[in-house]
Image: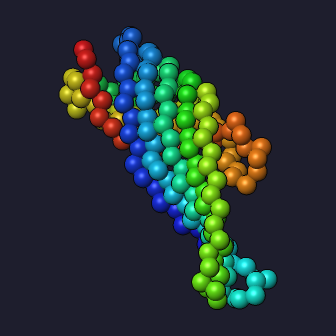
Amino acid sequence: MRRIQRWGLASRLFGGYLWHTDKFQYGLELGAMKYPNNKYRFEFDLPTSPTAESYVSVNIKYEGYLFDLLGLAQYSLTPTWNVFLKGGVTYAHQKVTAIAELHDPSTGKIKSRTKKKIEDRFLPEVAIGTGYRFTKNVELNLTYNHIFGNKLELDHEDTAAKVASVNGVMLGIVWLFN
């Protein structure tokens, strides 16, 4: 089996409010994110086929977006550096398209089957990150987030009502209103 993955870029827009004490801030954040169109390709040789070159390929395209409401706890390590934790709920929309093809080079024929799944679910989300404040109003953030979903299985009908987990690492600019 051969596996090829292609990843892309995600984008996220959010707004929120922080209440603060001296070094500790807490607040709420509402956001929207479009995650990348990930593409996977799997190829399987068929040793029992009449021709040794016959194989099956599966192309999977995975895309989606989400809206989230997160609680935020942030601690200022120094006047410029902070660390933060986020947790809350996400409304995730995912679309998965799988195309399976049987390739037979001896006849030049390709048999194809397409399967699409679109799912929407509310799921828990957590994030951890760090920020560096350049000015009073501009901060650079590095964040890892995880949305708790299910393992994606495209070959079973019982996958209805399941949304796959999402992991992301994001680098972004935050504008602060003081």
Q: Quadrant of the C terminus?
A: top left
State the residue lying farthest toward the left: 135
Q: Position of residue 52 (x, y in %)?
A: 70, 88
Asked whether, in this view, residue 120 is left or right of residue 39, the answer is right
Q: Nearer the viewer, residue 136 or 6?
A: 6
Number of numbered discs: 0
Q: Position of residue 53 (x, y in %)?
A: 65, 86
The residue at the point 44 percent across, 15 percent down is 27
Q: Nearer the viewer, residue 34 or 55?
A: 55
The residue at the point 51 percent across, 58 percent down is 39
Q: Quadrant of the N terminus?
A: bottom right
Q: Position of residue 138 (x, y in %)?
A: 24, 29
Q: Quadrant of residue 173?
A: top left
Res 116 seen here: yes
Q: Position of residue 16 (x, y in %)?
A: 38, 18
Asked whether, in this view, residue 30 is left or right of residue 90, the answer is left
Above or below residue 160? Residue 178 is above
Res 24 seen here: no
Q: Nearer the viewer, residue 54 or 12?
A: 54
The residue at the point 48 percent across, 37 percent down is 65
For the rendered model, the colour scheme is rainbow
Q: Quadrant of residue 98?
A: bottom right
Above or below residue 10? Residue 90 is above
Above or below residue 177? Residue 68 is below
The residue at the point 56 percent across, 44 percent down is 95
